[in-house]
Amino acid sequence: MQLRSVCLSELKRVLMVVSRYSPAVGGIEKHLHRVNAYLSRAGYAITVLTSSHERDLRAHEKIDGVDVFRIPFGWEKNPPLVYGWILKNRKRLQGCRVVHVHGTVPLMFWYLPLRLLNPVTPTFATFHGFERDPVPVLFRVLRKVARRLVKKAMCIGRFIERIYGIKCDHITIGAVDSPPAHVDGREGAVYVGRLEEDTGIREHIIAMGLLKNKYGIEVPLTVCGSGSLKDELSNLASSKGIDVRFEGIVPNAVSVMNKKKLALAAGYLSILEAMSLGLPVIAVCKTPLKHQYLRGVLEAGGSISIQTSAEGVADEIMRIMKNPELVRGLSERGMQFASRMTWKRMAQNYIHLWTEN
């Protein structure tokens, strides 16, 4: 698909507002960094307003041709301070003909003053995932209000329409880079994502123990990610005598995934990256919200095994390991699906959102 430019000069300057940006590592951060790269190649001048997610980051710098302005470190959770800083620096942020905000918090608690001062500037939003499971009533209300403040919205996952009760003008589950060459001799499983209760990581580790104790099979697991459960999960793996390596946050997790036979899923990005490499993907859902989230992969045309327990994960791994023909089919379908989910196509979706009536 060719990435087209918009001839109307007034649509060439875009302000992106997002909680964290490069060099921060994460799904939303990668999403916007990749999209901005393709938009820049299409002739758009991109400015990013974001937080200083760590000390000593520059207040203003260019990253791959994108102007990045950062709110002072530690201010992002104090709306009055952020409002004051944005109003003071509004001349540096105004002049963009399109504003696109990523998430409820940056829109409601950062950009709102400029939105009120410039009501005619078209403002759009991308809503990425859910903030908490289950979603608190207040979060639903805030997202409904946020949706009313923007002209159109892109949603990462169809479940956002159902859970939050908002209109999504475009729905996707994300995009993925072209995969590297496949590594021979793949072994073990990999998990990429947060180490939190809602991701299913505990069930995945318990499943590794069941495979060893129930089936007498050891499947080494590499965990890429961080979170509040890290120490607890490490102790759990030790108590079960299973081989689990906790690598922390890995900037290039795809290089780790490319050495594995199987992916245990957490979020859309890691699911797509695993499929692009031809890995069978297994996920765990313990709540209706997480089930709707994972169903989004199936609704988009992807192939994923959704389980509800550690026992289900262990049994599914055994089923996959015993059936090479099944693995080949899952691998081919996954790669074919991921090949359509490109960042170029995602950038084109943004342009369509801004220009379609």
Image: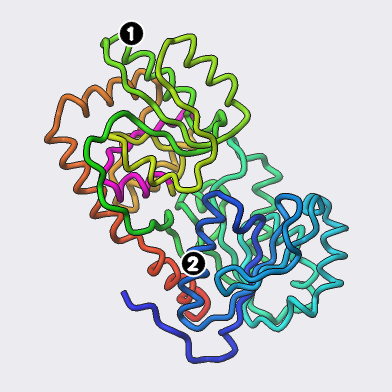
- The x and y percentages for residue 254 are 39, 46
**Amino acid at the residue labelled 1:** Asn
Whether residue 209 is visible, yes or no, is: yes
Residue 229, numbered label = none
Q: Quadrant of residue 64?
A: bottom right
The residue indicated by pointer 2 is 35
Can residue 289 be seen in the rendering of this structure? Answer: no
Q: Position of residue 78 (x, y in %)?
A: 83, 52
Front in this rendered view, residue 2 or 185: 185
Q: Pointer 2 and pointer 1: residues touching (CB < 8 Å)? A: no
Find residue 143 and report its image quarter. Answer: bottom right
Q: Is residue 284 covered in magenta?
A: yes
Q: Which mark is residue 213?
A: 1
Q: What whole-number distance in Å separates the C-alpha atoms at marks 2 and 1?
A: 45 Å
Q: Is residue 342 left or right of residue 134?
A: left
Q: Residue at x 84, y 63 (%)?
A: 83
Counting other residues with Cα less than 10 Å from the Cα at mark 2, is it few (<14), some (14-19), or many (20 or more)? many
Q: Position of residue 295 (x, y in %)?
A: 38, 43
| Residue numbers of the magenta segment | 270-286
